[in-house]
Image (cartoon, rainbow, N blue to C red):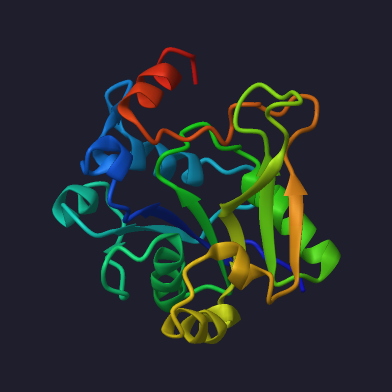
Amino acid sequence: MRVEPQSVTGLVLAGGRGSRMGGIDKGLQTLHGTPLALHALLRLQMQQGHRLAGCMINANRHLGAYEAFGVPVWPDTLEGYAGPLAGFLTGLERCETPYLLTVPCDAPRFPLDLLERLAHALEREHAEIAMAAGPEGDPGPTNPSRPQPVFCLLHVDLLESLTRFTQAGGRKIDAWTAQHRTVIVPFDQPGDDPLAFCNTNTLDELRAIESRAL
């Protein structure tokens, strides 16, 4: 199963409630003057090794603001802010390429070789899903590398499976990915950014990551 050039669409997940930010739209909060979702979109467009065929954004509020970023914007097809899997489902429904690459809007340092490494692992292991893993800060015994399930490369043929899973009430990413051939791809090697998967769940975390150069 080869991931050909131009066979992947990127998806920025920006459809959450932003509960830990007081209910504000997280993707539109600014980092160095640029909205978080736009940071994520630009990093997708800068991916090394494998060029994306295109990108889109999953958002449920302020759609006009997201549309100003210049890519298609799609709200969840599941009601009630059903979580990241709802974004996966929307992305797979709208994806016109064989593969979908998902990233959240709130991790502005994710790797620029994310797609390249996930694609190589997917091909090597003949997997259906490649999922990143890495620390969420300076590595050590209290901050081990762990799966990062919102950073996934998915085959679009998984749409039927995800539809069944969500219609049955399933909402946990790991419960769904466990049903499929999934390869975990470590991003904890020398030279990898230990803050690559740090996310900004609160305004204090956003300001903290802003204080460290991207």
Image label count: 0
Figure quadrant of residue 91: bottom left
Figure quadrant of residue 176: bottom right
Question: Which is more toward the observer, 2 or 17?
Answer: 17
Assign the N terminus to one quadrant of the image. Answer: bottom right
The residue drawn where x is 40% and y is 54% is: 13
Whole-percent x, y for residue 20 in the image: 32, 39
Asked if one can make out residue 211 in the rendered structure from this viewpoint, the answer is yes
Question: Which is more toward the observer, 80 or 71?
Answer: 80
Please give left or right for residue 140 compared with residue 61 in the image.
right
Please give left or right for residue 138 compared with residue 198 in the image.
right
**On screen, residue 184 above or below 174:** above
Whole-percent x, y for residue 90 in the image: 38, 71
Question: Which is more toward the observer, 120 or 125?
Answer: 125
**On screen, residue 175 above or below 211:** below
Asked if one can make out residue 6 in the rendered structure from this viewpoint, the answer is no
Please give left or right for residue 168 compared with residue 140 in the image.
left
**On screen, residue 46 above or below 172:** above
Figure quadrant of residue 133: top right
Extreme residue in the right direction: 124
The residue drawn where x is 59% and y is 82% is: 157
Whole-percent x, y for residue 115 in the image: 63, 51
Please give left or right for residue 188 compared with residue 34 in the image.
right
The residue drawn where x is 22% and y is 54% is: 67
Question: Which is more toward the observer, 91 or 207?
Answer: 207
The residue drawn where x is 31% and y is 69% is: 76
